[in-house]
Amino acid sequence: MNNNIDFYYFSGTGNTMLIARKMTETFIENGCHVNLKRMELSNGSNINIENTIGLGFPVAILSTYTLVWEFINSLPNVQGTEIFMVDTLGGYSGGLVGPLRNILEKKGYKPIGSCEIIMPINIFFIQDKKTNDLKIRKGLEKAEKYAEALIEGTTNWGRVPFFSDIMYLISIVGFKLSAIDLHQKYFKFKTDKSKCNNCGICIDICPLNNIVLDKYPVTQNKCEYCMRCVSMCPRHAIKSILTYKGNTYSAVKANDFVKNKTDRLD
Ligand SMILES: Cc1cc2nc3c(=O)[nH]c(=O)nc-3n(C[C@H](O)[C@H](O)[C@H](O)COP(=O)(O)O)c2cc1C
């Protein structure tokens, strides 16, 4: 692998951020030069095609978020630029690594490794802290081994033919449906005015700039349900149909997502 790595990731609630940071740490310990960048603050068409490209993202509805696909679709056509991917998930991804490989190969990339890492679930049934801590520990161990294997050149990017392509199509249709206003109407996150103190954190950290202030924060119509605002609100003031009993999960603090920061290793 080329030792100059540009690693782009998206993370809703911090799991993928932890994994991307762990891999970056491991690369650096092994003499690589790494730029770790957030997809939401980057433009795929501006990548440096001389470097190895890394992609990290969460699984969402057996696919990933539209903003991640938009980043991937905006990547330029190249001749053999190395690329690897890592996704984080609660349990089942539907095999999206296969279709993603196809898309990247058509653009001329050389897929050198894919890896899926189970991390705590950040939607509906949030598990207890002990269970989540164990998942994070195992996830970080897997991330470290994967980064070492990428350096050693012992990884591959497998694919699950046919089945994964069908899952991919279903999920793309699912996301297209999620973009229509009706869907946004029923799943819209709402501010609990009795709890909100207008700190503005949700507005600042929303990756889609989808929250505006109208006396209280109001969610507009391009939410992709990454759960960042719901999970990071210090007062648990954002109500969502996607949580159970109001329980939320986040792997990092809201400060890690503030927009004027690029990325940093703690
Ligand atoms: C809207 C939504 C959809 C999800 N869909 C799936 C899924 O299809 N399969 C799965 O295994 N996990 C799913 N998850 C769980 C996340 O993939 C998992 O918790 C991930 O590690 C979150 O990463 P992040 O903290 O970087 O956002 C979903 C989470 C959300 C918020």
Image (spheres, rainbow, N blue to C red):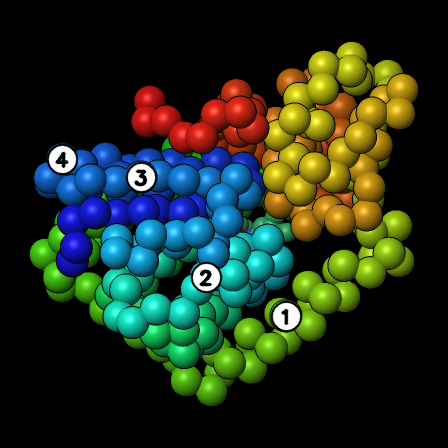
Tell me the quarter of the picture where residue 213 sits: top right
- How far is disc 3 from disc 1 in space, using C-alphas? 30 Å
Tell me the quarter of the picture where residue 232 sits: top right
Earlier sequence position, callout 4 versus callout 3: 4
Dot 1 falls on a residue whose secondary structure is helix
Queried on whether the Cβ of the residue with tag 4 lies below 8 angstroms from ligand 1, the answer reads: no
Give the quarter of the figure containing the C terminus. top left
Q: Amino acid at mark 4?
A: Glu
- How far is disc 2 from disc 1 in space, using C-alphas? 19 Å
Residue 166 as seen in the image, left or right of residue 135: right
- How far is disc 1 from disc 4 in space, using C-alphas? 38 Å
Compared to residue 119, the image places residue 156 above or below, namely below
Res 35 label: 3
Dot 3 falls on a residue whose secondary structure is strand
Residue at label 1? Answer: 172
Residue at x 76% of width, y 30% of height = 238
Q: Amino acid at mark 1?
A: Ile
- How far is disc 2 from disc 3 in space, using C-alphas? 17 Å
Queried on whether the Cβ of the residue with tag 2 lies below 8 angstroms from ligand 1, the answer reads: no
Dot 2 falls on a residue whose secondary structure is loop
Q: Position of residue 252 (x, y in %)?
A: 47, 28
- How far is disc 4 from disc 2 in space, using C-alphas? 28 Å
Q: Position of residue 170 (x, y in %)?
A: 63, 75
Q: 212 or 99: nearer the eye? A: 212
CB under 8 Å between callouts 4 and 2?
no
